[in-house]
């Protein structure tokens, strides 16, 4: 699956926020089980400070790929990590950026 984020300033004034990969956390869960977290094998995180006008929205320029493996703090080798089962298995994606969590999760079905 390719993962992306859209951030909208729903406020009435402009706000400044780091929207770079250093402040993004993508988390995939199945029930209460955390399967994958983008920060566990992240390489070269970067900052990108933007000012969003009231009502303005920005989206990821390049989607992040989940390789369907369980993330691990002890290894980043995909061959050493369990693969997420498919067959219609349900997962949920939550995103946090700059310390602000997504208002809801998005369901992912793997086949």
Image (cartoon, rainbow, N blue to C red):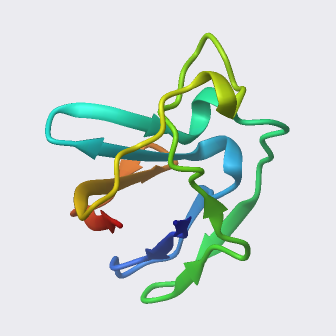
Q: Is 27 left or right of 59, judged from the image as shown? A: left
The one of 54 and 58 positioned closer to us in this rendering: 58
Residue visible at 52% across and 48% down? 98
Kindly identify the residue that appears in the image at 63 percent across and 73 percent down: 60
Q: Is residue 60 above or below residue 27?
A: below
Residue drawn 32% across the image and 66% down it: 108
Quadrant position of residue 73:
top right
**Residue 9: quarter of image:** bottom left
Quarter of the figure that contains the C terminus: bottom left
Q: Position of residue 103 (x, y in %)?
A: 23, 63
In this view, 110 is above or below 13: above
Residue at the image point whose x is 47% and y is 73% from the top: 7
Q: Position of residue 3 (x, y in %)?
A: 53, 66
Task: Give coordinates of residue 5: x percent, y percent.
Answer: 51, 69
Q: Above or below — where is 100 with respect to 7?
A: above
Q: Nearer the viewer, residue 87 or 61?
A: 87
Residue 99 placement (x, y as % from top left): 44, 43
Left or right relative to 111: residue 88: left
Within the image, what quadrant is residue 91 found in? bottom left
- Closer to the camera in the image, 92 or 24: 92
Q: Is residue 57 above or below residue 66?
A: below
Looking at the image, the residue that sits furthest to the left is 31
């Amino acid at each position: 699956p390719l993962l992306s984020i859209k951030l909208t300033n729903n406020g009435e004034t402009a706000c400044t926020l780091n929207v770079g990969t250093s402040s993004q956390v993508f988390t995939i869960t199945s029930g209460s089980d955390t399967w994958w977290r983008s920060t566990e094998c992240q390489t070269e995180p970067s900052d990108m400070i933007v000012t969003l006008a009231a009502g303005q929205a920005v989206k990821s320029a390049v989607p992040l790929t989940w390789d369907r493996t369980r993330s691990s703090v002890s290894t980043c080798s995909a061959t050493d990590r369990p693969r997420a089962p498919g067959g219609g298995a349900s997962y949920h994606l939550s995103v946090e950026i700059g310390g602000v969590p997504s208002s809801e999760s998005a369901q992912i079905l793997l086949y």
